[in-house]
Image (tube, rainbow, N blue to C red):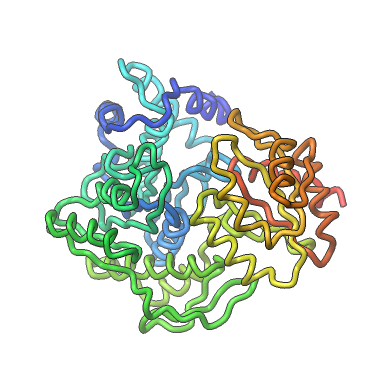
Amino acid sequence: MNAQQAIEYIHSVFWKGSIPGLGRTLSLLEKMGNPQDSLKFVHIAGTNGKGSTAAMTASILQKAGYRTGLYTSPYIYRFHERMQIDGQQISDEDLVAVTEYVKPLADSMVEQPTEFELVCCIAFEYFKRKHCDIVVLEVGMGGEFDATNVIAAPEVAVITNIGLDHTDVLGSTVEEIARTKAGIIKENGNAVIYRSTPSVEAVFEDVCSRKNVKLKKADFDSIRLVSHGLEGQVFDCGTRKGLQLPLLGDHQLHNAAVVLSIADTLIEKGWNITEENIYEGLRDASWPGRFDIVSREPLFIIDGGHNPQCLEALVKNIQDYLQGKKVIALTGVLADKDYADMYRPVMPLVEKFVCITPDNPRKLEAEDLAKYLQDKGADAVACESTRAGVVRAMELAGKDGAVLCFGSLYSIGAIADALKGVIDRD
């Protein structure tokens, strides 16, 4: 088996979608000797901000000298992003070795695991083999019945921003969704939450009270933006002054406040994290695909936001960072997404939409998206390929404009590859 074959096997595992329940994951891990039981975790659930929060937390722990695992999903550019140690993605050799170990065990099961469950088990084994001191573990979807929730009580359970997403599975109200995500909070542990409405916070307060969990709410009231630009942000939070963060947007300051509460909780539990580690960890944090500047000449920004809350943040970022610039949107979307809500708030801020077709069976064809946008009064054009879309968007933006890519995570990798090819050619 080589790395490509390992990934093809993972993707080909009797895909059943998302099936609630931990039984398959627990059964496979039992066959593997329960590698998760030898690890410590920061466990992160939520609707938005999980990945950014995880990346910042891992960066701080790495600066503190801990061998730090990071598990996230989905990947943006390549599968290996999903499992990292100290900022380095899993190697082809390690991915092959662990997959070859897990495959016969998974194949022997009567009810075989889903793809996500299989990847979780591979990750636990990888982090154990590499002797991680701590793993920052991002929930896939939901919380209580997510495959990552097979772990014992983590060092801290974290709930990021809650919104309406995956309502067919998680619940039709934010309170129902919060209850599902609170399933990662375990007896006698510690929890940190992103501030929300009183009704949502009441859900977490109730769970923590019943489970004897020490709850810490992120300090949003003391956040003060000092300065911001395309190179990053400087802000104060509580007694910490002049914090630097390369991730852009007001919402990232709120995510950073959550991370500061995580760090404080870990310190209280005896982890050796200094103020210098915290400052350096935030300063050097990296999380691709979220209002991510991938080129400055021309200004080319990729954003993976794909639900209403993400689009609110995107609108604010356009207003804050691209004021006065001609904005050309390079976009594609899946046919089963509520793309009316996705595009409506952005339309007044975009001069022209360049439409492409995502590489996904659920794709909406570029021509259909362009027609939809035109019917709504927007200036839109369809392109036959991602590369053609990149070239057209760059031409329309010119040297002083900005190309903004958003709409579907499934387009990001292809857009980045096409952009590199165009820039290298030039």
Q: Position of residue 357 (x, y in %)?
A: 69, 37
Picture residue at 59% right of the left edge, 46% below the top: 340
Residue 109, above or below 163:
above
Question: In front here: 70 or 190?
Answer: 190
Question: In front here: 121 or 302?
Answer: 302
Q: Position of residue 117 (x, y in %)?
A: 37, 32
Residue 36 horizontal side relative to residue 339, left or right: left
Residue 237, above or below 123:
below
| Residue 189 in sight in this render | yes
Q: Position of residue 349 (x, y in %)?
A: 68, 62
Residue 35, above or below 64:
above
Q: Position of residue 386 (x, y in %)?
A: 75, 40
Residue 320 horizontal side relative to residue 96, left or right: right
For this orientation, the residue located farthest to the right is 426
Picture residue at 28% right of the left edge, 46% below the top: 180
| Residue 135 in sight in this render | no
Residue 245, above or below 346:
below
Picture residue at 30% right of the left edge, 15% below the top: 110
Question: In front here: 413 or 378?
Answer: 378
Circle count: 0
User: Quarter of the image holding residue 62?
Assistant: bottom left
Residue 405 horizontal side relative to residue 218, left or right: right
Question: In front here: 323 or 64?
Answer: 323
